[in-house]
Image: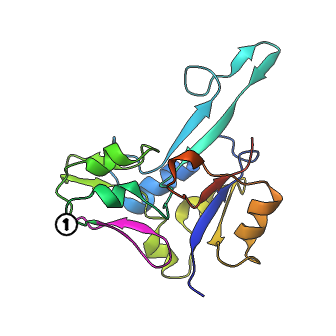
């Protein structure tokens, strides 16, 4: 059976430390201002501020890597076929084919692809395909101190990630978009 890689982000365990963001920048060498991975604060109108009035405050975090959609809108709009989805579900951008038009940036409902002005191309999370191909975890998964990320084969019902999605009631973002993302989230 062909693998379908995916991830669960356990929002009850995520503390918004952004180790995943730093890991991504470290592993992929992205320049300042280009973040393939970001962590949003769900709370007040400013980052890391809660919503509500004391003592009734609430705040959680939402890590946002590429969703590696099974029906990726970025791939459909790319005029040079620079964006492809591998058999294992990882969506990649071939920088040699990318002309920097940014159609994929506008097409992505998750606002994930980032324009790298220095390189003149669009870039995004690769689920650390270079690591996955060597049997390793994506670096964001490996460095998560609180174990808020579980990665693996979604086609294997006995994989840790598949079991966790069921156990933690994992859901995808923007289901109505029809993109069929493979990054799941547990409720906060």
Local SS, label 1: loop
Residue 178: image x %, image y %?
52, 53
Residue at the image point whose x is 49% and y is 65% from the top: 70
Residue range in magenta is 83-95
Q: In this rendering, would 34 be left or right of 50? A: left
| Residue 67 x, y percent position in the rendering | 51, 56
Residue 164: image quadrant is bottom right
Q: How many marks?
A: 1
Question: Which residue is label 1 attached to?
Answer: 97
From the viewer's perspective, is residue 110 above or below residue 47? below
Q: Is residue 91 magenta?
A: yes
Residue at the spot 57% in from the left edge and 71% down from the top edge: 5
- 146 magenta-colored: no
Q: Residue at x 54, y 58 (%)?
A: 180
Residue at image point 21% right, 61% down: 98
Q: Position of residue 175 (x, y in %)?
A: 59, 49
Q: From the image, which quarter does the N terminus lie in?
A: bottom right
């Amino acid at each position: 059976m062909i693998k379908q890689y995916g991830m669960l982000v356990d929002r009850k365990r995520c503390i918004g430390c952004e180790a995943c963001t730093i890991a991504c920048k470290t592993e992929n060498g992205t320049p300042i201002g280009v973040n393939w991975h970001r962590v949003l604060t769900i709370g007040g109108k400013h980052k890391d501020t809660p919503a509500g009035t004391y003592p009734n405050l609430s705040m959680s975090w939402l890590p946002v890597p590429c969703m590696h959609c099974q029906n990726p809108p970025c791939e459909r709009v790319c005029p040079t076929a620079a964006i492809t989805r591998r058999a294992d579900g990882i969506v990649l951008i071939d920088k040699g084919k990318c002309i920097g038009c940014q159609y994929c940036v506008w097409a992505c409902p998750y606002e994930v692809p980032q324009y790298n002005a220095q390189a003149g191309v669009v870039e995004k999370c690769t689920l650390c395909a270079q690591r996955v191909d060597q049997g390793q975890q994506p670096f964001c998964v490996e460095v998560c101190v609180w174990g808020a990320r579980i990665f693996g084969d979604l086609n294997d019902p006995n994989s840790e990630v598949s079991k966790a999605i069921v156990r933690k009631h994992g859901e995808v973002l923007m289901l109505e978009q029809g993109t069929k993302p493979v990054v799941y989230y547990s409720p906060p």
